[in-house]
Image (tube, rainbow, N blue to C red):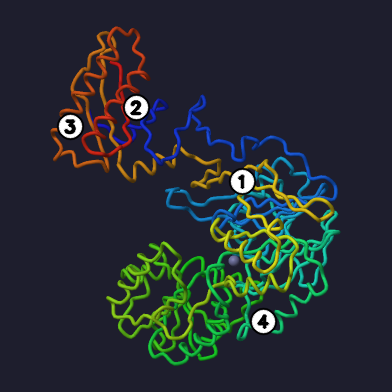
Amino acid sequence: MTYTPRTLRRALGRDRLRPRSGRPGLLARTPRAPGGRAVSREPARGGGREGAKIPPPAPGDIRIIPLGGVEEIGKNMTLVETSEDILVLDMGFQFKEEDTPGIDYILPNTKYLEERKEKIRAVIITHGHLDHIGGVPYLMPRIGYPPLYTRNLTAIMIKKRQAEFPHLKNLDIRIIEKDDHLKIGALSVSFFNVTHTIPDSMGIVIETSYGLIVNPGDFKLDHVDEVPTASEEEAYRIFDKKKVLLLITDSTNIENPGFSTPESVVHKNLEEIIKNIKGRIIIGTFASQLARMIHIIKIAEKYGKKVVIEGRSMKVNIEVAETSGMLTVKKGTIIPAAEMSAYPPDKIVVLATGAQGEEFAALMRMGTKAHKTVQINNRDTVILSSSIIPGNEKTVEKLKDNLARQGAKIIHYRTSEVYIHSTGHGNRGEIEWLHRRLKPKFFIPIHGNHYRLRLHAELARDLGTPEKNVIVPDNGSIIEITNKGERMTVLKEKAPASPVMVDGFSVGDIQEVVLRDRQMLAEDGMFVIIGSVNTQTGKLKKSPDIISRGFVYLRESQDLLRQTRYIIKKTIEDAARGMNPINFDYVKNQVTDNVSRYLFQQTAKRPIVIPVILGV
Ligand SMILES: [Zn+2]
């Protein structure tokens, strides 16, 4: 008998068995509810009180809960709650991790908010990066579409993404102008400009009777020799003579000493390069580096060059910049790639995605000669205007190899004598500057994995914030400022914080079973056993069929196969003996157990074993 994928799927049906033998270090085995839906058995975090109704903060107290972004870099979301109101600050997502194969995005858990929808007065977004806006289309429906407040450019980016989810309700987006002072619920909220890699980035200030709660969002300083620019000084002047009750801020670059390179230096260097280099220039950067892309297009225009934009996310972001009025270019400055050959190479600047060596991004396709319109040659200069995100070292090397093999000259921030890239997050020196400038009474580090938050907490203590006034949170930690603003404590209860996965079209609680299967399939493959049993005698009709993928090369493992077939036959016949009718679930469990054990003994591998046993 042969099995096509369809007949196999039908034969497997709903009875598909889980492998019984877990592998140490993998996700715990998850029980199944009737109907086959996976139920997360993850222990409630925070001592089992998760989900229990946590009473609202007492009048006068302030509750802060980081729902995401404090055990990882990404999915930033923090809520501020009083007895009356909840404000949500940012709504990001995180890209998949190594231990979440096949998952598209990871979202913060919003259960706490879902249970208190009626109190949510606003979602306030600091800037348009995906780790701050990515969750909007997935999470707004869950929390009842509260009004969303942000600056113009961020609003356009959110709307642009929202258009990809046409089934959703329209968002109530309210644009914030620079000096707006808003009354949201019973709270007064104002904003200040911060320097980041995307324009219209802003910090949030919430006024309380005990002082200000400040969250600058992602920030750095566009300083000259560690002195902030005049416009930055102006922006932070709102804190003069003000009491800052609580600072909640970014820890991304806490490990990097000193001040980061100002973006203005990078801009100047890129201008020199674009002006002077002969031949075509191809610049790879992040689509999120919108300020830099805008600058590059402006200098290209200044030197009479044409700009080709390659990569969807980059095209989208440039369009957003044009719509918002942040980028105005003459008609004909940005040209389609197909028109490139009409101009001398000296007149061409290509802006491309993929400086991290992403497999399908424009630069990698150029590198592997798979790009439709851009063929690299030895007169090209490729500028990689980005740092390497930890974990991407190998793919970036591969990218450079591929480009170099085609003769391109490569300028990378490491090989370059001048700065052609700078981080978007303030280094330790800038973070220190912020603490000194604001002198907060209480401090909660956010945006970073636990180690970074710890370093940031140490810095705050070194700068004079008393130990008891600093709390390093986990996702879901419930922190309260009580006693008329005199005390900050963390409750023993936690808000639900297990991550929510976006997997294709489905958004749900952690799909442990699916993830574990993907991990096992990736590591050890699958092993399908197909047998037909005579329902009267409990005997196998013939030797069982075996299909495997990604396990061992069966043709060269005849001994293993023979022995496995023998084990299958013996297991089925022993298990089915004297049964009438045969309990197929029981028989299949026995087969899975015995075969998994045997294969592991022989090969030290644990493929997913799937027995399909048909009664005939
Ligand atoms: Zn950012």
Q: CA distance from mark 3 to mark 4?
A: 71 Å
| Residue assigned mark 4 | 228
Q: CA distance from mark 1 to mark 3?
A: 46 Å
The location of residue 47, given as percent across then percent down, is: 61, 37
Q: Which mark is residue 109?
A: 1
N-terminal of the pair, mark 2 or mark 3, is 2
3 relative to 210, above or below: above
N-terminal of the pair, mark 1 or mark 3, is 1
Query: Callout 1: few (<14), some (14-19), or many (20+) C-alpha neighbours within 10 Å?
Result: many
Pointer 1 residue Cβ closer than 8 Å to ligand 1:
no
Pointer 2 residue Cβ closer than 8 Å to ligand 1:
no
- Residue at screen point 50% across, 26% down: 35
Looking at the image, is mark 4 or mark 1 nearer the viewer? 4
Seen from the viewer's position, the closer of residues 22 and 381 is 22
Give the quadrant of the C terminus.
top left
Seen from the viewer's position, the closer of residues 447 and 613 is 447
**In this picture, residue 337 sits left or right of residue 226:** left
- Residue at screen point 47% across, 87% down: 274
The location of residue 165, given as percent across then percent down, is: 59, 52
Look at the numbered disc 1 and give the secondary structure of its residue.
loop
Q: CA distance from mark 4 to mark 2?
A: 68 Å
Residue flagged by tag 4: what amino acid is it? Pro
228 relative to 82, above or below: below
| Residue assigned mark 2 | 11
Query: Callout 3: few (<14), some (14-19), or many (20+) C-alpha neighbours within 10 Å?
Result: some
Residue flagged by tag 3: what amino acid is it? Leu
| Residue assigned mark 3 | 561
Looking at the image, is mark 2 or mark 1 nearer the viewer? 1
Quadrant of the rendered image holding ligand 1? bottom right
